Amino acid sequence: MNQELEAYLTDSYPTFFHYRATDETVADGMDPAIAHEIACDDGWFPLIEAVATIAKKQFNTRGDRETIHATQIKEKFGALRIYVNRSPDRITAATWMAQRLSEQMCERCGATQGTRKQSDTGWMKTLCESCGLEWRGVPEEVPVWQFTYECHECGSETPVLYPVGVGGKHGGAWEPVGEQLKTLTEGNIQEVFSEVQRTVVYGNCCVECDAYQGNYYVYEAAADRDLTLETTASHDHDATRVTTVTTR
Ligand SMILES: [Zn+2]
Ligand SMILES: [Zn+2]
């Protein structure tokens, strides 16, 4: 979390965040080595502040004189975890609710629309579409390649389009460029239901029989043709670079 927000939380809720090493707490004898930072991105700030507010109320107004403070705050498996030194019912409820809400809230920008858990090389994060693209290092513009593919349904040769580097590890999620792909006459991109992803996706359909070809299989075929962001010409196969599309 950025230092300004952390400083705001520490100043506003000194009891709850007392474990943090500041100039003052270190002067008071705190060992900076045992202090933690708030180990998540800024988007979850409102959730953390809400829990701190509830802890403060518990301490001030409910006759509960033993302090409640956070012992660790971090992101784990794409959700916010707030650990506390002790946990009366309301605090348990508050930290549980913050965790559940964080799974619907972009950890980077706080957006609640279009967020989903995204994974990249073993890490999982809850992010909105555009923060997810940034996190996965997807460039703002990506090339689209066309190559010939054998339809799994009717066996015809059909042209397919492949946007390089948009879909993550398994090449599947083409949402950011789907509408642009649909307008390209070099292929037959439609919105179809994917049995694998259990949702509607943009994908290639056969020009003869309209069968969806499966983004993952097209992605594998593209990998066989060495189509990466760096590829400028494909010598071995029939692939041609059609155009570039913008991801955000
Ligand atoms: Zn975001
Ligand atoms: Zn077909």
Image: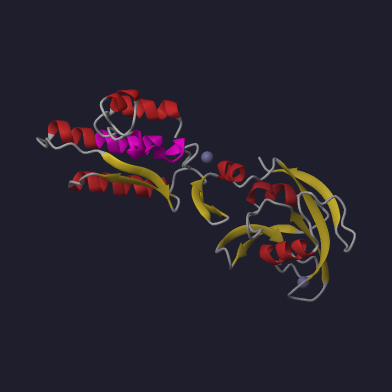
Corner quadrant of residue 149: bottom right
Corner quadrant of residue 137: top right
Quick check: 125 above or below 157?
A: above
Front in this rendered view, residue 233 or 149: 233
- Over which residues does the magenta segment extend? 32-54
Q: Measuring 73% from the left and 75% from the top, which residue is drawn there?
A: 153
Front in this rendered view, residue 150 or 189: 150
- Extreme-right residue of the structure: 235
Does residue 54 appear left or right of residue 244 in this picture?
left
- Extreme-left residue of the structure: 63
Q: Position of residue 148 (x, y in %)?
A: 83, 65
The quadrant of the rendering that contains the N terminus is top left
Q: Position of residue 166 (x, y in %)?
A: 67, 51
Quick check: 7 above or below 58?
A: above
Front in this rendered view, residue 29 or 66: 29
Q: Position of residue 30 (x, y in %)?
A: 28, 32
Q: Main secondary structure of the magenta part?
A: helix
Q: Measuring 33% from the left and 33% from the top, which residue is drawn there?
A: 20
Does residue 92 appear left or right of residue 241 in this picture?
left
